[in-house]
Amino acid sequence: MVEMIRIAFPNKGRLAESARELFERAGLEFEFRGDRALQAALGDDFLALFVRAEDIPEFVADGAADLGVTGRDLVAEANRPVEVLLDLGFGRCRLAVAVKDESDVRDVDALPDGTRVATSFPRLTERFFAERGRKITLVPVSGAAEIAPHLGVADIIVDLVSTGSTLKVNGLREIATVLESTALLIARRELLDDPDRRRRAEELTTALESVLRAQNKRYLMANVPRRALPELKRILPGLNGPTIVDVMDGGEFVAAHAVVDRREIYRTIADLKAIGAEGILVTPIERLMP
Ligand code: AMP
């Protein structure tokens, strides 16, 4: 029997659900055995392990897992040797420096020496300020850094921001970005030295990539008057230009098919109507491999 490739997934939190959804959309079903749900079979090739997102870079670096899905922020903070295979795009956030609303400080250079910084990202924070020649005092916390300035245990914070509402509610204002983050698929370096496992990791990467690529695209079909074909080419440049198919008994109409950027659908439909198109149909795409 071929050895399963172990993939570490976040067991809870912001990344957990999106990670699972993405793999399912790529055609890999999670089969849970037993009720503790610490692991699940994932297709024929993979075994999913559910652990804390924070621990995943370490588990992948030391071989407890072969692959992992976790945030770029956590990979950077862990500073362990892992290979990034793919940016998964979800879990977008930034690690930001924030001061109290009433503070006069507008940028990092204006922070006095000895500023106390509460963060659960001590390594990245230390490096960020050192690179800018600022001498800070770290106040490591395991979460909820936004409370620290109000408790008087820190002057400022370095924390993850997504919508910014947590900062706002806590009377804090962003002054700098330390790191932009999204979820990543990471791999143990040695995994890639084994040709068979490397191939299976690459197949997985390709499958996930095709799902991610399809997310922002739509498949559009329309019946278009033959005489409007020159204008159609302008409206639907597509991946390779639109596919034109004869319609049985279609008379003056041909069917045009094209892959269109999701954000351009609204405009494209209006343009198609304007050249006399009918029977316009837009559908999601599950996978796209150019
Ligand atoms: P928000 O209020 O949307 O700016 O979210 C900020 C809070 O959510 C902070 O407490 C962060 O620690 C947490 N957070 C935001 N985005 C993420 C993420 N991608 N991964 C983990 N925690 C996050």
Image: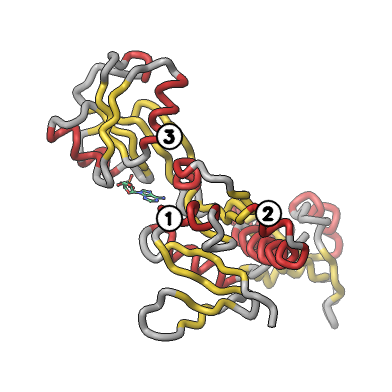
Task: Judge by depth and name the residue closer to the eye, 28 or 288.
Answer: 28
Q: Position of residue 234 (x, y in %)?
A: 79, 49
Residue 254 seen in render: yes
Label 1 beta carbon within 8 A of ligand 1:
no
Q: Secondary structure at mark 2?
A: helix
Q: Residue 254, percent across and down?
A: 83, 70
Of discs 1 and 3, which sits in the foreground? 1
Report how far apart the C-alphas of labels 1 and 3 lie in the structure.
16 Å
* Residue at which label 1 appears: 55
> Which quadrant, please, contains the N terminus?
bottom right
Q: Is residue 276 visible?
A: no
Q: Residue at x 31, y 37 (%)?
A: 119
Residue matched to label 2: 271
For this view, does 236 lie left or right of residue 109?
A: right
- What residue is drawn where x is 28% and y is 18%? 105
Disc 1 to disc 2: CB gap under 8 Å:
no
State which quadrant residue 283 falls in: bottom right
Q: Is 65 situated above or below 149?
A: below
Left or right: residue 29 versus residue 236 is left
Residue 257 — which label? none
Q: Which residue is mark 3?
A: 124
